[in-house]
Structures are given as structure tokens and as C-alpha cells.
Image (cartoon, rainbow, N blue to C red):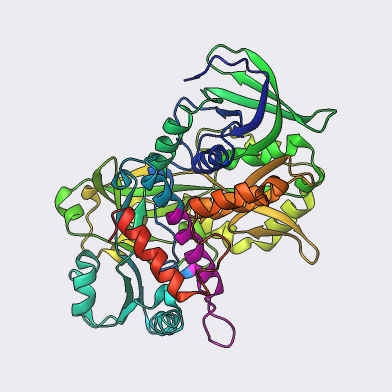
Amino acid sequence: MSNNSQELNKADVVLIGAGIMSATLGVMLKELQPDLTIQIFERLDTIAAESSDAMNNAGTGHSAFCELNYTPQKPDGSIEIKKAIQIAEQFEISKEFWAHLVETGFISSPKSFITKVPHIAFVWGAENVEYLKKRQQAMAKHHFFKDMLYSENHAQLKQWMPLVMQNRDAGQKVSGTYMDIGTDVNFGALSRMLFDKLRQQPGVSLHIQHEVENIKRAKDNSWTVTVKDTANGNTRKLNAKFVFVGAGGGALPLLQKSGIPESKGFGGFPVSGQWLVCNNPEVIAQHNAKVYGKASVGSPPMSVPHLDTRTVNGKKELLFGPYAGFSTRFLKKGSLLDLFKSIKFDNIRPLLSVGVNEIPLTKYLIGQVLQSPTDRLKALQDYYPEAKMSDWKLEIAGQRVQIIKKDEKKGGKLEFGTEVVTSADGSISALLGASPGASTSVPIMIQLIERCFKDKAQSAAWQAKLKQMIPSYGQSLSNNEELANATRARTSEVLGLA
């Protein structure tokens, strides 16, 4: 799928990995400067088949409505909502850009990638119920979350989520919060739409089954990128002024090959996942929500259990999970040697110290790997008491690589989230980490553009274009209730969520 016969020897921009991050950055840069030449390389034979794919990605439009790991309880018992506000604002910005693409005809049908689905947080037990109540009280004071409903009433909760409350012990102490304006996002479908349009632009070439083997600094401070065509085994080199490594779990090894000082000390901790996928249409029809619970002690954020309504290729699906696990692969279709190859002299101390300090996580992952079908059914029945194993099948979910970085006190620490690593001159940038990644792809790429194309980003032409793409650009949605409400109303209308 290589279009344009342009000789593969020079490019203004090289994007590595055909997922949501590269798609977003490519579309933005082409709007900001239409004469840019862009080369995109994807190692697989399909676009967005790794982290961005619908079944490899949580698919929740992460707005912090239902994800309890974004609102930790502080030692004094109060609830910290700062991260929740930040993530909610980032998702609103993503919706602004998608609405712009719909309005300009770049995306023809928003329903093919985004749908409205209520977001529910659900807990049981006196301590958890008290936590959720305090969380709702704290969050409802902010305009992003002012419509968040709370209930401990079984009858009310049954209206919100019939499957979850069906034949549940009437004496069990439970509670839930409800946000009507939640969304489900198929990031695989969105990525494919963006790439389909992007590769029709002049000066853009997309190459599938092309694996980037090396990235090396050239004498003029540009980059020499070595690419292998895995279909025929041929290897080629090209020169790039700017390189973005958006290869999911494959980003760390490529970043290490670049040799930039900023890459030193980073390591990766791979976490695999599995879903239980419902195959009974009658059960699927009874649930219409994303119901998130509390994570187990020691578990990574991507493993927060949820009973999840999804729309995949126009069809309603119901998933439960993800069940976490451990694999030494950095990609779902990677090598078992990925982890070992990533170990370098500069990151061995952070890796070893995390191994020592993260014993609860290690125990949790081992326990998840050793789970029997009965164990998995029991976990599902906490959320859906009437669940029968015959209605569900186990499917492999995506592979995530959590960031390990240097830490002055501990030697190394495990980071849950995403981080952009950029060279001092801004000529190469890589995205590491996992959740809430895809949902915050637009603000992450705006920040990258501001860092890597600093002079141009500050020019009047680019500033004007950025404000066209993101009408709230340069303003704070979290601090301006009137602007936030108007923005949310407009994007909901354009994206068919109203």
C-alpha cells in the first residue's frame, strides 16, 4: 500500500507506526503546512492492528467519569481530582479536533468511530461505598462533572445497569455514579479513516509491511532511517528532518537506537491482556454502559475491571476484563526477546530496582497468568452475578509497555501513563507508555508540535490554524465553565453525541 512514486530517499517527516498517534500527528502537520513531505512506515500488513485496534484498546473515551484510578484517596481521607480534571480536559480537546475534521469533510461519518455510552463507576463494601460517595461529592463541584449522579439504591442502580444488579444480594452494600455523556471510541476505525485521507494528500506515502530497523543521526543533524520491506526482504535508507516514533510497545527499542541522551535510563515493563467477549446476543442487548470498578491491589491501571459495551464495525459487543498477564513481548505480534533486548547498561539499575520495589505488581501478574476459567468467571460474576461461561469466550487483548525511568531515591520507578521523549533540538520524538494514550492523542500531539516545531508553532499562520483545528486553543477549559459548556455542546452536536 505504497502510494506516490516519489523516490524513497528524503522526507520532511517520518512517522513510525500506523496507529492513532501517527495518524493524528500526520493530519495535523499536513493541515499546518500542506507542502510537507511525509513518509509513514508500518511493520504489519494492516493499519492500526496493535495498540489502536478496537479489541486491543479499552475504547473508553477517557474522561475520568468512571475510572477510579484517576481519583486516589489521600491519607487524610479526601479525594484528589486534579488528574481527573486534566484527563477530562484533554479528551474534550480531542473531541474538538475530531469535530473539526467532520466539519471540514475529512471524516464523513463520526458514528463509524464514536458513540454515546453512559460511564458508570460501581463498587461494593462499606469502605468502597464511602470512597465513591466522597469522590462524587468532590467531582460534582467541578463543571466537567457537575452532572454526575450518585446512588446506593438497588432499584435505581438496576435502571442504570440491569445485568450488574440482576439477582444481586439485596443486602449487599453497593453504590454507583452515572455520567450520561460518556463515549465509546473505536480508535482502530478512526486511525484507518485518518490514514485513508492522509495518504491521498500530495507528498504523503504510506508503506505497510515496512519495518524500521535503525535510526541514526546524520552529520547535518537530520536522521538516517533504515527500513526493511518485509514482503521482499529489501532494505532501503532515507533521510528525514524530523522523526516521530509512535510504534506502541516498539517505540522504546527504536528510541534506544537513536542514541539521544534523553533516551538514557528508560526501560519498559510489558503487560499483556485478555478479554472475555460475550457471544450471546440476548445478554449483549441487556447492557448499555461502561461499568468500571476498583483495581486490585498492585494491578496496573490498564487492568481496572470493566463490563464494557462497545461498538466494533457497527456491531454492538460486550466485553469484560481485561485480565492482565506478563509476556516478554513489547508488541502483540512481537518477539519473546523484546524485553531482554531492551536491557542496556544505562537502564539496568532502574529495571532491577523496579523489580524489587514492585513485588505486589509481580504477584498480581503471576496470579492473573495462573487464573483458571473458573477464576475468570468468578471475577466476571462480581459484576454480572448471573454470568454463564457458555456465553463468553476468551480473546487476547493488546500488549502494553509501562514506562520505567530513573528515580533519585529508589533507583527506578514504574510510571503508569504516557510520556513523550524528545531530543534537545526537537528533531526526533517518541511516545512511551499506555493509558489514557489514545483518548488524549490530540493534546499530546499539540504539545509535541509546540516542542518540535517551536518557531513555526509560534508563527501567526500556525497559531491561526491551530485555533481553527482546536477553537479553545490557548484557553483553559478546566478554568472556564462557560467555554467548556459551549465547547462540549458544539462537539456533541457535530459528533452525533447530543
Does any portion of residue 189 appear in the rendered image?
yes
Please report the bounds of the magenta region as a residue range.
69-96
Query: From the viewer's perspective, is residue 344 above or below residue 303?
Result: above
Q: Position of residue 129 (x, y in %)?
A: 38, 82
**Residue 30 location, quadrant:** top right
Residue occupying the point 68% across, 52% down = 458
Q: Position of residue 280 (x, y in %)?
A: 18, 48
Q: Position of residue 420 (x, y in %)?
A: 65, 50
Q: Residue furthest front?
A: 460
Judge left or right: residue 37 versus residue 214.
left
Q: Residue furthest bottom?
A: 76
In the depicted view, which residue is nearer to us: 29 or 417? 29
In the depicted view, which residue is nearer to us: 62 or 281? 62
Residue occupying the point 55% across, 55% down = 443
Query: From the viewer's perspective, is residue 254 above or below residue 474?
Result: above
Per the picture, the main secondary structure of the magenta-coloured stretch is helix
- Is residue 81 a member of the stretch shown in magenta? yes
Judge left or right: residue 224 versus residue 368.
right
Q: Residue furthest right?
A: 219
- Is residue 238 a member of the stretch shown in magenta? no
Q: Position of residue 419 (x, y in %)?
A: 64, 53
Q: Residue furthest left?
A: 282
In the depicted view, which residue is nearer to us: 233 or 371? 233
The quadrant the C terminus occupies is bottom left
Q: How many marks?
A: 0
Does any portion of residue 437 appear in the rendered image?
no
